[in-house]
Structures are given as structure tokens and as C-alpha cells.
Amino acid sequence: MSKLILVVDDEKRLRDLVSAYLTEAGFQVVTACDGREAMFRARDAKPDLIVLDLMMPEMDGYQFLKQHRQERNTPIIVLTARVQENERVIGLEFGADDYVCKPFSPRELTARIRAVLRRVEDKQRTDDMLRASDITLDLDRRQCTVGANSVTLTPSEFDLLAALMSAPGRPFTRYDLLERLNQALSDTGERVIDTHIKNLRAKIEPNPSEPAYIETVYGVGYRFRG
Amino acid sequence: MSKLILVVDDEKRLRDLVSAYLTEAGFQVVTACDGREAMFRARDAKPDLIVLDLMMPEMDGYQFLKQHRQERNTPIIVLTARVQENERVIGLEFGADDYVCKPFSPRELTARIRAVLRRVEDKQRTDDMLRASDITLDLDRRQCTVGANSVTLTPSEFDLLAALMSAPGRPFTRYDLLERLNQALSDTGERVIDTHIKNLRAKIEPNPSEPAYIETVYGVGYRFRG
DNA sequence: CACACTTATGAAGATAATGTGAAGATAGCG
DNA sequence: CGCTATCTTCACATTATCTTCATAAGTGTG
């Protein structure tokens, strides 16, 4: 099964070169010349890996990275022009999986691609999923599925549900749950949780007034039915 | 509650990168450059998790692993240079909890760390249970089971029953029991207990008028039949 | 068996916890 | 900067639990 690579760079010469070489190496390739186009390509082609130049007009690499990560968890190899430690770190912190410095040899690039793909395959064995009843949480992609339907949760809602599902049957106090939301615990009242739970229930419960998944434990907090 | 990670690697560059990234991700970090130093750090800092490079001078990863395991059971993630199956297996056999192959992305590392920490926490949650006759109290989940049926108790009822079951056969005065309910002892009359006991009996006794579990000790209080 | 005292019980009022909708604040994005 | 989604706050409705109380029933003692 041949892998699909998305190459994002504003220089046509480079796109063609890389493209030719990767095709030769047995990959399928699609290209994009800026971040905007890349978003489209990534959405419909769903590549297995993305090679991304950080320096681009229109929408630069960082923006693309950040935005793309909200949708998918495609491994990304960053092309960084300067060999500065700085940029590498930044690239990696933005969520890249590896980087290659320009100028680079096509051989090196394919080697890295293969390495990253292998790693990712490994990882998928241990992919972070929470399942309980007929709810599935994909912790990496931050996606939630109830039965057959995919449900869109806000960040807080997702984190809450993840916390509850991490230990089905165990009740969490509102304070416990607050901590999960704000790593640096804010001074927000505990009742925020109530509201989030309400909204969560509205999204995942067939009948919110009689919760099947998220039970309230009077005087304690909430728990995921286990 | 932020977790403390010990990063052991001989390459300063890598230590700094990982360190920066983990800090960013909300962990606290201490580092060591070889096995010898790692032993010291592990002893006094008592990290929640250790990231360990297997290839090091002075005292290599295997030695450290082995020696450290004799003292503590800290979860360990191994950094392994080559992608050889060999080394993975060895690492795991030595007692590592997971491995990450170099070169790795910080994202992957933090994901693994979170996964391992979560696993370990789950394990540590060794639910303490109170059992007597055919009643079970799960103190963590605050669940009560009588025979095969799960019974829903109010906070007071649960705490009362937990108190009684903590010392089957021993009678508790109403005052004793009141203290269990209101840490800051309120001025509520001792008769409240009677009512709670009544409600409790209604929930757990097959025949409340002839209590099989909660006996009343005339002139003293109540006790759980032991 | 009468008496003083303790406990059981049911009902009702008081209190506290949670549900809910709407509106104000905030943050992220274009 | 304005827009939107999200987060937060708040007031009020609703419910669960707690507490009180009056009365009935039970217990031990002389």
C-alpha cells in the first residue's frame, strides 16, 4: 500500500524535484504552494505525511501547522532554511515530527520520511483511545464518537469527558474536574462544571434529563457510568 | 498536581530540547547526564517518571535501570537509538514501561509520557473496599452493593455505613457517628442519626423491622453485625 | 406491670445541591 | 477591528438530602 505525501513549498523547482524523487521512491505525491492550498489538499487527499516549508507567503508554515493539527494528526516533516537551533525547536514545538535543513539531499528526505512513517505506525498500535459504552474518544485527534455519529465537542467539554471516561464509575469532584481543565488552576467558581456538564449532556445524551452516560453523584460530583 | 520527570541523557542538546518541551507541556523536569548522576537525582527528587537513554558513558542505561528498580518502581520510558526489535525487547524486559526510538519528536514523547502516567495512576488506584456479610462498600466510587443489587445511598448514609462497617461488631455512639458526618461537629441533635439509620435500613435490610446488618445497641448506639 | 427512658417511624419544614436558561466576558481568528 | 465560538457568571427553578418534631413502640428496672 503506497503512502501519500503532501509537499508544501512555494518554490516550484523544489516541489518538482522532491515530487519526482519521492515518486521514484514509490510514494504518491500531491503538492501545494502555500498554506491555504495545503489546507484544502490536506482535507480532501488526507495524506499520510506532510513535508512542509516553514517560510511561505499567503499562510506560513506555522499557521498551517497549528490549524492543521486541530483537524488531523498527520505526521509532518518541516523544511527549515536556516540551521538555527531556534527554528528547529520552534518547529518541533509547533507539533512537527521531524525537521530537515535546507539544502537537503532527496535521499535524506526520503530516509526521514520512512523513519517517521515507521514511527507513526508503531504509535498507532498504542493509539490513545478511550472507549466506554458506545462512546469513543480519540485523544490524539480530539474527536468524539457516540454510536455511529461523530460529535463536535468544545475543548473543555472534551477534556471533561476524557477525565470522566478515564475512570468509568469513579466520581470526580468539581474541583478534580476543574484541575483537568485549567492546568494552572484558576479561581473560577466550581459551578462552571455544571454548565459544561449540561452542554455535554445535551450533545451526547439521548435524553439529557435522564443521563445514560454522565451520572451526577449528589454531594460529590459526576461520574461516567461504568 | 504537576508531575516531575527525570530526563537522563548524555547529550546536552537533547536534554535541553526535551526539558524545554516538557516544561511547556506542564511538567517539572530535572536532568542527569549519566547513570551515576541519575541514581542521585532519582533518590532525592523522587520523580514520577524517568526518561532514560540506554546508551550512555559512565553507567549505561541497563545498569541504571536494574539498580534503580531495586529501590523504587518509578515508571521508565526508554530512549533507544536503533530501531532494532532486539533493543526494544531488551529494554522492556529490563523493566521499562515504554520505549521511544530516536530520533523522536517531542510530541510523541509527551504523548507516551502521558499514556504511561495514566496507566500507572490507574494501577495505583487500588480501590479500597469494605466487605462484610454480603454488603460491599467501594469507598472510591462511593458505591454500595447488597448481594447482587447496587444500592444508591445519600452522602450521609454512605458515610454512616462506612463508619459502622469499618469496625464490624463494635458499637458506635450517636456522637461518634455524628463526628463522621460533620467534621466540624454541628449542633444538630443526635437524633438525626436515628433517621439516617432508619433510611439506611430501608435501603439495605431485607426486613427493616428486624435488622440483619445494622443492630441497635440499647443505651449505646448502633453496630454493624460482625 | 408501671415507670422512666430509649428507640422507631412517618411526615413536614429547612437546607443544600444541582439543573437550566440567558446574558456578560473572553479568546481566537480572519 | 469586528466576528464567532467558547467560557464564565448569575439568578432562579427544581430536586435531593438533611433535620426537626410529634408520636408510637420498645426496653430495662424495681
Image: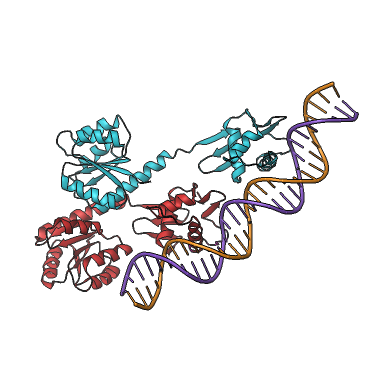
Chain colours: A red, B cyan, C purple, D orange
Q: Which residues are magenta?
A: A203-210
In the image, A77 versus A91, the foreground residue is A91
Q: Position of residue C1 (x, y in %)?
A: 90, 29
Q: Is residue B221 above or below residue A68?
A: above
Choose top left, top right, bottom left or bottom right for residue A58.
bottom left
Can you see residue A224? no
Total number of numbered labels?
0
Q: Is residue A85 above or below residue B187?
A: below
Does residue A54 appear left or right of residue C14 in this picture? Answer: left
Residue at 55% in and 43% down: B143
Residue at 21% in and 55% down: A116
Secondary structure mostly seen in the magenta stretch: loop
Choose top left, top right, bottom left or bottom right for residue B142.
top right
Choose top left, top right, bottom left or bottom right for residue A73.
bottom left
Residue sticking out furthest to the front: B187
Q: Is residue C6 above or below residue B28?
A: above
Which quarter of the rendered picture does the N terminus of chain A lie within? bottom left
In the image, B206 versus D8, the foreground residue is D8
Q: Position of residue A219 (x, y in %)?
A: 56, 49
Does residue B211 appear left or right of residue C2 in this picture? Answer: left
Q: Is residue B198 above or below residue A70?
A: above
Can you see residue A176? yes
B71 part of magenta stretch: no
In the image, B41 versus A121, the foreground residue is B41
Q: Position of residue A100 (x, y in %)?
A: 14, 58
In the image, B111 versus B162, the foreground residue is B162
Q: Position of residue B95 (x, y in %)?
A: 29, 36
Does residue B140 appear left or right of residue B123 in this picture? Answer: right
